[in-house]
């Protein structure tokens, strides 16, 4: 078991702990889940372990493809060692197909294919419901430079290509996702997670969601959906929880 005593911060799906090395931290993935900015809470049994394994797979793939990220190695079922970055308080959302808040904003039905990839920036501020902002807001607020945002966008589009192709091979469509980035020794690294908690994954044949939308919209079989993504990605069949 990993020694988890020095809590740095606690997020919706993870806890972050300090290690003896100031350049590293431990992410512990949680079964707890939150939607609608904390208004809806629940527990998806097994989610923490599944997301830890999915993130290990995806971050390893991204490293192989040259996308700099915070992942170092998986430590145990629930925990991974990561580089301790300073998170940039801007969330990047990438969209291939209309869903979620974009469907509401532009009035297009869910599932509409977009003519080009859409990139959005949101402030990472849950009290304000992560509002949509543009580059001039970000630079005016002095929370990131134009160069940092340009790098984040470039890396986000590469993640879209790499993860999109990887998912297509296992008959999953990458609808959209959100990413967070961090500063580390003068570079911008992809941080946070890439998992069914942060991406919309639809089965390519049935268009059924295989992600957190199953919890958000009370569709049932949430744990099974997460398990299915892990199984198709890695062949790994985690033992079903009690
Ligand atoms: P939307 O803006 O349509 O709600 O979300 C776009 C994408 O970002 C979806 O894949 C969604 O799951 C993800 N996303 C949006 N907000 C959050 C959030 O607060 N937490 C997490 N984990 N993912 C989010």
Image: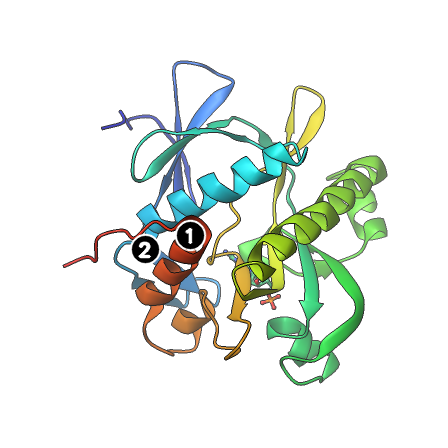
Q: Which mark is residue 12?
A: 1
Question: For the point 43% across and 59% down, which residue is it?
Answer: 229
- Give the x, y percent position of residue 124: 61, 50
Q: Is residue 93 above or below residue 221?
A: above
Res. 192 in view: no
Q: Which residue is tagged 2?
A: 32
- Give the x, y percent position of residue 152: 73, 42
Question: For the point 34% across and 29% down, which residue is it?
Answer: 75
Q: Secondary structure at mark 1?
A: loop
- The part of the image, by quadrant, that contains residue 130 is bottom right
Q: Quadrant of the N terminus?
A: top left
- Give the x, y percent position of residue 71: 51, 32
- 185 and 159: which one is in front? 159
Q: Which mark is residue 173?
A: none
Ligand 1 position by quadrant: bottom right
Q: Are marks 1 and 2 in contact (CB under 8 Å)?
A: yes
- Residue at the outermost left position: 242
Check mark 1 vs ligand 1: CB closer than 8 Å? yes or no: yes
Q: Quadrant of the C terminus?
A: bottom left
- Give the x, y percent position of residue 23: 52, 18
How was this image coloured? rainbow
Q: How many callouts does the rendering have?
A: 2
> Along the horizontal axis of the image, is 211 left or right of 179?
left
Disc 1 versus disc 2: distance between alpha carbons? 7 Å
Q: Is residue 194 above or below residue 7?
A: below
Q: Residues within 10 Å of mark 2 (few under 14, many from 20)?
A: some
- 71 and 42: which one is in front? 71
């Amino acid at each position: 078991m990993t020694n988890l005593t020095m809590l740095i911060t606690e997020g919706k799906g993870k806890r972050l702990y300090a290690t003896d090395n100031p350049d590293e931290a431990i992410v512990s993935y949680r079964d707890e889940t939150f939607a609608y900015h904390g208004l809806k809470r629940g527990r998806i049994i097994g989610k923490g372990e599944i997301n830890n394994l999915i993130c290990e797979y995806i971050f390893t793939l991204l490293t192989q493809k040259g996308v700099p990220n915070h992942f170092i190695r998986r430590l145990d079922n629930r925990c991974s060692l990561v580089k301790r970055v300073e998170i940039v308080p801007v969330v990047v959302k990438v969209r291939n197909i209309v869903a979620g808040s974009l469907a509401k904003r532009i009035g297009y039905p869910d599932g509409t294919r977009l003519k080009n990839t859409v990139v959005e920036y949101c402030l990472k501020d849950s009290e304000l419901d992560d509002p949509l902002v543009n580059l001039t807001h970000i630079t005016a607020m002095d929370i990131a430079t134009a160069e940092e945002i340009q790098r984040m966008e470039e890396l986000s589009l590469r993640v879209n290509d790499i993860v999109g192709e990887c998912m297509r091979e296992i008959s999953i469509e990458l609808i959209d996702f959100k990413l967070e980035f961090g500063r580390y020794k003068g570079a911008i690294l992809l941080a946070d997670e890439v998992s069914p908690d942060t991406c919309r994954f639809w089965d390519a044949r049935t268009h059924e969601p295989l992600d957190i939308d199953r919890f958000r919209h009370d569709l049932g079989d949430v744990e099974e959906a997460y398990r299915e993504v892990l199984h198709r990605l890695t062949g790994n069949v985690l033992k079903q929880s009690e």
